[in-house]
């Protein structure tokens, strides 16, 4: 065969092979229809390796696509067997990586690995190599020729398109997966919300009151069994319209509840109100507390309303019973908030004062009280409200029927919770006017009795008074006649007459003194509280009684303490008490003849701020059963006695905030003693001696 023909035939053969290679390469994408990047890379490197008799094919991707690794290298098996010297894939990869780090323009056409020279063709995958790089290597001397270069670049393009496609595909898959996840998450959330809703509806079904829900526009979308059973309504009837349920409401309450309902729905605030609902079972209307609240989502959007109706008929009944009780109880009652504002007065109190409930609520109660008493009452009330201590005042309260003020005692006590906080104040008002007046009258009677006692005491003392005054009087008479005689003598005894005249004056003064003392004791003097010396007052009484005591053969001994403090009291009244005790002691000893009639009067300090006076006799004493009665008015064991001395004495001592008592002695007789505070607080003339004593008519 001529060389030209041979060349020609060779050329045809080459072209044919080239053509079939090209067809094979172009057929590759048909195998990549699954878009699996691992398969793309593997079929690519396998095809190229076989097609061009290469020693290795290397693919490196810029980022992993799907399941394909970043680096793939395939080394020809024949090459491995024939040429033991061919480097291992690892070494090729390392050598290529070193070279490929550079700009693609500068990639070398040959690399040397382990002394072996290898021709290489490096091709970018993607227009700018954004997908990766493909390197084909062969130790063949003529590698690569023109055709091989061309075919390799077509293969690289095909692979780039395939990989690009699978990259898009995998991105789409990722998006799809993410979408799937979000859908399932949302589905789970919705399922949970639904379960929650079911739970709530289940709860509403089970709670022991009538309950329902409405849409945000007020249309009912659920009612529980309790509602249906109580009202006897059918479910579809209730759900048929927004106001169907209201047919169960008492006709008198319907308009009011409808207004409250729509107002609550419109405002989104819900409502709370009370109304009567008809019970289907017996046709009775029972009071219910209706509460409707809005249900909102986390963002605060109104979802629906939930309502309940709680039967409060029994509660109302017991409230009504309580109200009836407070209204029928024959007392004036009131109550106040913990802060002290009046919130209730019963009708009896309002009738008494003539004010309306509205007028006295809050701090209106001051209107009921006499202007002069308001300040005292308000101060006590503020004190109680802040400390929680019971409240008690005696104030003049307006009495409507006769338009006067009457003395009333107002009391209040706090109702406390378990922690001791005040929940409420409950109070009473008690009209004490008549009692107070009786008390006043009693005082006047006692004052009169005291006067009677003085008169009677005076009657008994008349003899001794006469005796006391008689003595100086007869002295005056004797002295006066002696004086006259001396003047009539010749020559007149001037000096003697002067002396007897002096004695006359002395006796006259003595008589005058006695009378002054008696006047002091029995004069119609009104009570005066003053600072006084009890010893001095006692001595005066002793001086007055001495003659009488001597006549009764009584031996008086006085033991008056030196260091006695001054006391505040009514001198004349205390002297009356002492006089009475001395006289009683003397009386008790009048029949004692087997022993000296000793009488001891003592004064002494008692504790720090009190003093004591005691009168001890050796008389007959009294029977134990009489002890309790001694101080009763009109109790007497004496023929001529009046039985008021001790009763009046005790009330005098008590008005001085003291105490008068009697006790039997160890030996014969008894001891009467009183103890009074030196400076009793609040002691005034009024308190020891009632100011309203009518003027005494008889001269004392
Ligand atoms: P009167 O002296 O007019 O009887 P009083 O009230 O002073 O009235 O005394 C009442 C009674 O108390 C006396 O009647 C007497 O029985 C008894 N009594 C009073 N003082 C003594 C006393 N010192 N010893 C025994 N009994 C006394």
Image: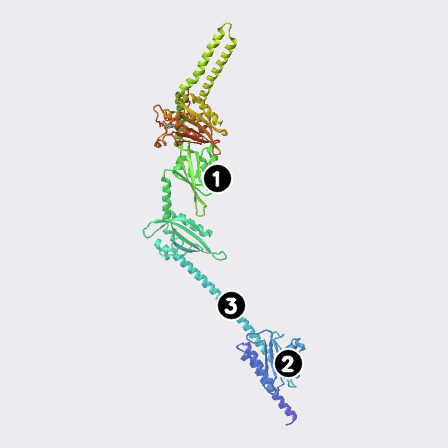
Q: Position of residue 188 (x, y in %)?
A: 47, 65
- Residue indicated by mark 3: 179
Q: CA distance from mark 1 to mark 3?
A: 73 Å
Is 624 situated left or right of 691 in this image? left
Compared to residue 344, the image places residue 94 above or below, namely below
Task: Name the secondary structure under disc 3.
Answer: helix
Q: CA distance from mark 3 to mark 2?
A: 43 Å
Q: Nearer the viewer, mark 2 or mark 1?
A: 1
- Residue indicated by mark 1: 383
Compared to residue 118, the image places residue 196 above or below, namely above
First along the sequence among labels 2 and 1: 2
Task: Name the secondary structure under disc 1.
Answer: helix
Dot label at residue 121 = 2
Is 4 situated left or right of 676 in this image? right
Q: Nearer the viewer, residue 71 or 461?
A: 461
Q: Position of residue 547 (x, y in %)?
A: 42, 20
Say which residue appears at 47% left-offset and 30% top-offset. Answer: 604
Q: Position of residue 257 (x, y in %)?
A: 40, 49
């Amino acid at each position: 065969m001529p060389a030209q023909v041979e060349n020609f035939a060779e050329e045809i053969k080459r072209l044919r092979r080239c053509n079939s290679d090209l067809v094979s390469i172009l057929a590759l994408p048909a195998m990549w229809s699954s878009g699996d990047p691992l398969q793309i890379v593997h079929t690519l490197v396998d095809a190229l390796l076989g097609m061009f008799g290469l020693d290795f094919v290397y693919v490196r991707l810029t980022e992993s696509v799907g399941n394909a690794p970043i680096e793939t290298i395939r080394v020809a098996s024949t090459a491995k067997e024939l040429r033991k010297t061919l480097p291992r894939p690892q070494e090729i990869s390392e050598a290529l990586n070193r070279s490929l780090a550079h700009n693609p323009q500068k990639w070398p056409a040959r690399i040397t690995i382990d002394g072996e020279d290898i021709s290489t063709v490096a091709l970018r995958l993607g227009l700018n190599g954004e997908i990766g790089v493909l390197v084909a290597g062969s130790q063949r001397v003529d590698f690569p020729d023109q055709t091989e270069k061309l075919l390799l670049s077509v293969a690289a393009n095909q692979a780039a398109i395939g990989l690009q496609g699978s990259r898009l595909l995998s991105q789409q898959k990722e998006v799809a997966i993410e979408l799937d996840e979000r859908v399932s998450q949302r589905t789970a959330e919705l399922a949970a919300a639904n379960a929650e809703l079911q739970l709530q509806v289940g709860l509403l079904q089970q709670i022991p009151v009538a309950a329902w829900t409405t849409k945000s526009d007020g249309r009912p979308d659920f009612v529980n069994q309790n509602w249906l059973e109580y009202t006897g309504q059918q479910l579809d009837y209730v759900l048929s319209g927004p106001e169907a349920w209201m047919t169960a409401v008492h006709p008198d309450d319907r308009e009011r509840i409808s207004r409250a309902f729509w107002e609550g729905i419109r405002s989104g605030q819900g409502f709370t109100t009370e109304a009567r609902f008809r019970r289907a079972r017996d046709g009775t209307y029972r009071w219910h507390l209706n509460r409707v609240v809005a249900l909102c989502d986390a963002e605060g959007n109104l979802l629906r309303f939930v309502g309940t109706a709680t039967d409060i008929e029994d509660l109302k009944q017991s409230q009504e019973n309580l109200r009836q009780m407070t209204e029928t109880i024959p007392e004036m009652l009131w109550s106040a908030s913990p802060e002290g504002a009046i919130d209730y007065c019963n009708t009896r109190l309002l009738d008494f004062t003539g004010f309306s409930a509205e007028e006295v609520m809050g701090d209106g109660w001051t209107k009921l009280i006499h202007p002069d008493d308001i300040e005292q009452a308000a101060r006590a009330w503020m004190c109680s409200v802040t400390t929680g201590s019971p409240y008690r005042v005696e104030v003049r309260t307006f009495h409507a029927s006769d338009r006067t003020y009457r003395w009333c005692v107002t009391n209040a006590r706090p109702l406390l919770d378990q922690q001791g906080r005040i929940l409420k104040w409950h109070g009473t008002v008690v009209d004490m006017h008549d009692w107070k007046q009786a008390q006043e009258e009693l005082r006047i009677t006692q004052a009169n009795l005291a006067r009677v006692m003085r008169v009677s005491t005076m009657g008994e003392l008349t003899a001794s008074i006469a005796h006391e005054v008689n003595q100086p009087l007869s002295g005056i008479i004797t002295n006066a006649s002696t004086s006259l005689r001396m003047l009539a003598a010749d020559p007149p005894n001037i000096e003697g007459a002067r002396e007897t005249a002096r004695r006359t004056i002395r006796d006259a003064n003595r008589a005058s003194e006695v009378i002054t003392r008696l006047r002091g004791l029995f004069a119609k003097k009104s009570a005066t509280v003053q600072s006084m010396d009890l010893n001095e007052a006692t001595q005066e009484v002793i001086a007055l009684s001495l003659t009488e005591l001597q006549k009764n053969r009584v031996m008086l001994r006085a033991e008056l303490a030196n260091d006695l403090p001054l006391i505040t009291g009514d001198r004349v009244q205390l002297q009356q008490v002492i006089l009475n005790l001395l006289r009683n002691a003397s009386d008790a000893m009048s029949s004692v003849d087997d022993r000296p009639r000793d009488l001891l009067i003592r004064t002494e300090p008692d504790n720090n701020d009190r003093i004591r006076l005691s009168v001890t006799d050796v008389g007959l004493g009294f029977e134990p059963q009489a002890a309790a009665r001694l101080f009763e008015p009109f109790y007497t064991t004496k023929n001529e006695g009046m039985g008021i001395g001790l009763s009046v004495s005790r009330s005098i001592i008590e008005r001085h905030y003291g105490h008068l008592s009697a006790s039997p002695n160890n030996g014969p007789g008894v001891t009467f003693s009183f103890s009074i505070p030196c400076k009793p607080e609040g002691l005034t003339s009024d308190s020891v001696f009632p100011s309203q004593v009518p003027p005494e008519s008889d001269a004392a």
